[in-house]
Image (cartoon, helix red, strand yellow):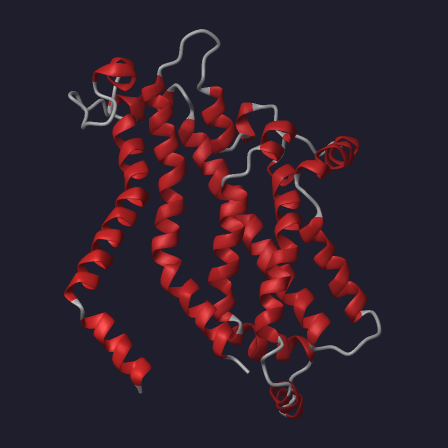
Amino acid sequence: MQLEERYTLKKSNPAVKVLVYILLVIWAFINIFPIYFMFTFSLKSNEEIFGENVVGLPKEWLFSNYVSAMNTGNMGLYFVNSVLVTTVSIFISLAAAMMATYAITRIKWKGANFTNSFFMLGLTIPLQASIVPVYVILSKLHWLNHYSTLIIPYSAFTLSMSILICTGFMVDIPYDLDEAARIDGCGLWGTFGRIIVPLLKPAYATIGIYAFLQCWNEFMFANVFISDSAHRTLPVGIKALSGAYTTDWGPIGAALVIATFPTLIVYIFLCRKIQDSFIAGAVKG
């Protein structure tokens, strides 16, 4: 009772409230300022960026930087490539993770635990350590400079975490539902498609945002495996904007905005679903 009263007293103390609001405002500023700086950076000339007006609003709003980035820098094509590669990779990873998790957790067979451990080994393999072997394999298969050159490795490297997330939700689904579905005439695929898949909806957003961030921001594979401009993604395209001797930084800032804002938009739309999925995973069982 004393603890309750003490907590209520602290919570209702005006000084504590003011301090909390001040800390929240500072934290909000720390998080929002980089977005503000990047956006204003993208609308400035080199003179403003390097001395005249580093932090303030642009004196002249150079929206031509975006036109230059889209046309000269070919950011439009790179953006479409990133969207295509990321979207397909997410769907492949999500579908493979759900099917693999269903086989591991709901079907009784001798190799289930070993298979799960094998998949979890993927969490321990650094992306950098796999560049050479993956490149050799893709080269021998004549599979370089295609969209699938990135889609297959991206799907593979997000699969382990996707299975881990799916497992956390699927093990809490009562097995009685599977048995009831079989009694009603559902086969293996019917049970999976009609019972398990709808119940895994809370996990979709978590897997989707994780795979999106991994694929959208990935640079090393895209830089090594793709050498032609037709299949480049945004991170590699932004790097190509930097000149050998002189660099116009405004269009680079515009390209960074084009690459970064989709991530923020995706998170804004999915943040509530991600929070719901964490809550659902916490209270199950």
Q: Position of residue 250 (x, y in %)?
A: 32, 21
Kindly identify the residue that appears in the image at 45 percent across and 6 percent down: 245
In this view, the residue farthest toward the right is: 110
Of the pair 250 and 281, the residue shown nearer to us:
281
Q: Which of the 4 quarters of the picture holds residue 62?
A: top left
Of the pair 198 and 185, the residue shown nearer to us:
198
Kindly identify the residue that appears in the image at 67 percent across and 49 percent down: 156
Kindly identify the residue that appears in the image at 64 percent across and 28 percent down: 224
Kindly identify the residue that appears in the image at 45 percent across and 26 percent down: 238
Q: Which of the 4 quarters of the picture holds residue 1?
A: bottom left
Q: Is residue 134 above or below residue 50?
A: below
Please give left or right for residue 239 compared with residue 179 in the image: left
Q: Is residue 125 above or below residue 79?
A: below
Q: Position of residue 272 (x, y in %)?
A: 36, 64
Q: Position of residue 144 (x, y in %)?
A: 68, 31
Q: Which of the 4 quarters of the picture holds residue 247?
A: top left
